[in-house]
């Protein structure tokens, strides 16, 4: 008995065969088909229940070998009659007689092959998509004099905030894509631009306090950037908001006035302050602070490209092994100087940026482009000289500063 089953998938066909004929069915043929009208018929499996393994054809009447026997193997299962060696390889999967139970393994191997080829295809499509997208953005990239008038306002805001031209053009092009021609009033355009900015701004995850060991945050950066100010503000804020378990460690012990200033603050705010003048003192000091939840490490700022300063910071870094290294930069610095400072301090393992003096900065663009360019997310922003003038960096707040 030979029966043909059609189904949507091979798995479905095998289930039906197993249910209707049983596991002894032997597959004679399986193939993909294209049914002209029925979309549920995509594969065809031909099976037999005739036990061909027990019934090899007998020799011819004459008693002589007809030659047919030679086409059955020792188990009596008819092997494939190959046209030629090349065809053998490609048609083997389709025509070999496979007991149904084994065919599950076989199908699984086909499916794995199929899955791999789909993954390759998806990867390729993804690459094509990104290539097409940047080509498209390139196409709508705007030059200063060809900006549609509805976008003139946001374009001016970007330019006033010191965005490098390339980034400004990308941001504008993306905003245009979000604004259909019939909804380009100023409020809508601004809103979309803020969304585009928010999506790009890189923010560091909030620090996680752990039990048993303090979170150690080290602050480095050029002279006068605002490191000590940020530390005092963070420590003060922590104690005010119910976390008195904060300590300050300063490695800035020699500069006139620096230590005294920090000592005065710590005494007034009742915060533990430890001084470290050499890396050898680190283990003892941190042993004393092991029950603290947060330790803020202040460092001395020197002029850029000072090798002695770099070496000093490196040895303290190696001895302290802080969890986070925050590069503190004043936002009112010119773009070129910000780049120089970022490049000089990146070698010192900075993994966060803090911008200070946001209140004094006429350009806010660096809040977006600098973290992207150097791959270090924003942590805090100092926005004034008062003890409360520090905030956790937040996308929406920054987008509002840029597009008013
Ligand atoms: N307007 C404004 N001034 C700030 C801000 N942060 C710091 N300052 C001022 O910047 C000056 C330098 O701040 P510090 O905190 O001493 O800077 P520092 O990085 O510790 O400096 P060094 O230790 O000398 O490297 C001080 O006069 C601060 O008041 C801020 O967010 N806004
Ligand atoms: Mg300082």
Image (cartoon, rainbow, N blue to C red):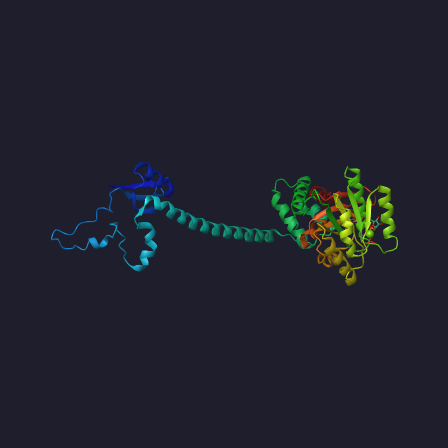
How many marks can you see? 0
User: Residue placed farthest to the left in the image?
Assistant: 62
Residue 53 percent location from the top left of the image: 25, 47
Residue 18 in sight here: yes
Q: Position of residue 127 (x, y in %)?
A: 53, 53
Eyeballing the image, is 26 above or below 335?
above
The N terminus lies in which quarter of the figure?
Answer: top left
The foreground one among 145 and 204 is 204
- Indicate the quadrant where residue 8 lies: top left
Q: Nearer the viewer, residue 290 or 128?
A: 290
Above/below status of 281 relative to 385: below
Position of 110 with respect to 383 (left or right) is left
Residue 185: quarter of image: top right
Task: Give left or right: position of 17 versus 213.
Answer: left
Q: State whether residue 328 appears in this view.
A: no
Residue 289: give x, y in percent of width and height: 77, 46
Residue lying at the far bottom of the rendered structure = 307
Q: Where in the figure is residue 6, as x and y percent of width and height? A: 33, 41
Which residue is nearer to you in this view: 181 or 84?
A: 84
Image quadrant for the C terminus? top right
């Amino acid at each position: 008995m030979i029966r043909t089953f059609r189904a949507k998938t091979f798995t479905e066909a095998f289930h039906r065969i197993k249910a209707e004929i049983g596991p002894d069915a032997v597959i004679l043929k399986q193939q993909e088909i294209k049914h002209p009208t029925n979309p549920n018929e995509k594969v065809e499996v031909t099976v037999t229940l005739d036990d061909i393994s027990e019934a090899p054809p007998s020799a011819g009447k004459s008693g002589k070998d007809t030659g047919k026997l030679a086409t059955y193997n020792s188990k009596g299962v008819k092997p494939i009659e190959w046209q030629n060696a090349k065809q053998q390889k490609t048609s083997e999967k389709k025509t070999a007689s496979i007991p149904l139970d084994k065919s599950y393994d076989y199908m699984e191997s086909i499916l794995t092959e199929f899955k791999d080829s789909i993954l390759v295809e998806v990867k390729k499509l993804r690459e094509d998509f990104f290539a097409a997208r940047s080509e498209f953005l390139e196409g709508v990239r705007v030059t200063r004099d060809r900006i549609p008038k509805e976008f003139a306002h946001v374009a001016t805001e970007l330019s006033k905030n010191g965005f490098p031209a390339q980034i400004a053009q990308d941001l504008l092009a993306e905003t245009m894509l979000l604004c259909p021609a019939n909804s380009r009033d100023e409020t809508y355009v601004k809103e979309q631009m803020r969304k585009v900015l928010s999506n790009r701004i890189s923010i560091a995850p909030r620090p996680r306090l752990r039990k048993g060991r303090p979170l150690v945050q080290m602050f480095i950066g050029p002279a006068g950037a605002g490191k000590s100010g940020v530390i005092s503000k963070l420590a003060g804020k922590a104690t005010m908001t119910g976390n008195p378990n904060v300590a300050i460690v300063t490695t800035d012990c020699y500069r006139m006035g620096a230590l005294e200033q920090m000592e005065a603050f710590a005494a007034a705010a009742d915060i533990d302050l430890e001084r470290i003048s050499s890396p050898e003192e680190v283990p003892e000091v941190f042993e004393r602070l092991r029950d603290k939840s947060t330790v803020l490490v202040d460092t001395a700022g020197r002029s850029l490209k000072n090798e002695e300063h770099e070496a000093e910071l490196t040895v303290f870094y190696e001895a302290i092994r802080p969890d986070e290294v925050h590069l503190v930069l004043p936002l009112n610095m010119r773009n070129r100087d910000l780049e120089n400072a970022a490049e000089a301090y990146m070698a010192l393992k900075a993994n966060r940026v803090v911008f200070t003096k946001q209140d004094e900065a006429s350009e806010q663009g660096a809040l977006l482009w600098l973290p992207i360019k150097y791959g270090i997310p924003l942590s805090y922003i100092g926005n004034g000289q008062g003890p409360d003038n520090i905030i956790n960096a937040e996308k929406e707040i920054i987008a509002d500063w840029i597009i008013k």
